[in-house]
Amino acid sequence: MRIDPLIKSKHPFIIDGGLSNVLEEQGCDLNHKLWTAHLLEKNPEAIIQAHSDYLKSGAQCITTSSYQASIPGLIAIGYNRDTAEKLIMKSIQLAEVAIKRSLESGLVLFQPLIAASVGPYGAYLADGSEYHGNYGVTDEILRAFHLERIRILDRSNADILACETIPSFQEARVLSDLLNHVSKPVWMSLSCRDEQHLNDGSKIKNIVSIFRNHPKVFAIGVNCTNPKYISGIIKCIKANAGNKKIIVYPNSGEAYNAKSKTWLGISEPRLFVKMAKEWSKLGAHIIGGCCRIGPEHIRNISKVLVKN
């Protein structure tokens, strides 16, 4: 199995950071309902470069640009179903190109993994709903939304399905059922408001219990969450997750304004490294970053956590 290096690693396994911030630094305009997925057709080379930046920084796994690339979302802006499916699959292909180029150039001396991003229903709404998780929809709507994309990504060349930024008990429960039928290993990453609760107010320990014995989920954790809560969340997950790996990739702790699509605050790579060392000691097996965490952060934690 290609994820054996992740499972058997003696050191924390390092994944990448946020995709949007790297693309914005390239000059890409992400003020679009599809966010980073908008570039799958408009500027695929920018996505390849962003992946390459993380690989060069030491990321052992890169996460695809499919977070907001859902079938309903793509159809809603005018793509037909066939094109929508091809664009979702293209997110995997761009990651493959980045890996191929990095290996051929000698910048990377190992075979990185690809995690196919499965974003929450709130990402499709593009109104910041993933930050509260109270969608007000039925299980059937959530199931239909996720099913097609999961099927597409499950038959791709990705190594892992990364269900991420999941903010509600309802959505986690629906995904748990759908994931029983996939062929790839899965990491399940929640979005939390504090050390004990998801964004919708559900208790983290109750969500973790859903996946504790799940046959396809190998790791449970948290992303797009303020780093000040991560240590407490690790303790909570560790107490309830059995033998599952623990994955953490928080944001920078800055405040996001969903209306203006801007961030307020600063991020400090040195502080992030200090925190990452603590997360590792507490039991996190897989560590990376989300929004506003960039290649410099990943480079620094890779040097400290992998080589020491």
Image (cartoon, rainbow, N blue to C red):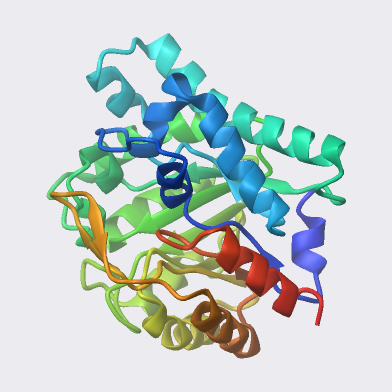
Say above or below: 86 vs 68. Answer: above
- Residue 296 placement, left or right of 254: right
Say above or below: 129 vs 124. Answer: below
Image point (29%, 28%), residue name: 73
Horizontal and vertical percent for residue 223? 43, 65
Count the labels in the image: 0
Tell which of 249 and 70 is nearer to you.
249
Tell which of 298 and 14 is nearer to you.
298
Tell which of 21 and 235 is nearer to you.
21
Q: Quadrant of the C terminus?
A: bottom right
- The picture quadrant where one finds residue 42 is top left
Image point (35%, 50%), residue name: 174
- The picture quadrant where one finds residue 48 is top right
Say above or below: 157 vs 306. Answer: above
Q: Is residue 115 visible?
A: no
Horizontal and vertical percent for residue 241? 54, 77
Image point (84%, 38%), residue name: 105
Tell which of 197 and 94 is nearer to you.
94
Image point (16%, 45%), residue name: 137
Horizontal and vertical percent for residue 290? 45, 60
- Residue 38 placement, left or right of 7: left
- Residue 125 placement, left or right of 254: left
Q: Is residue 29 visible?
A: yes
Horizontal and vertical percent for residue 291? 40, 59
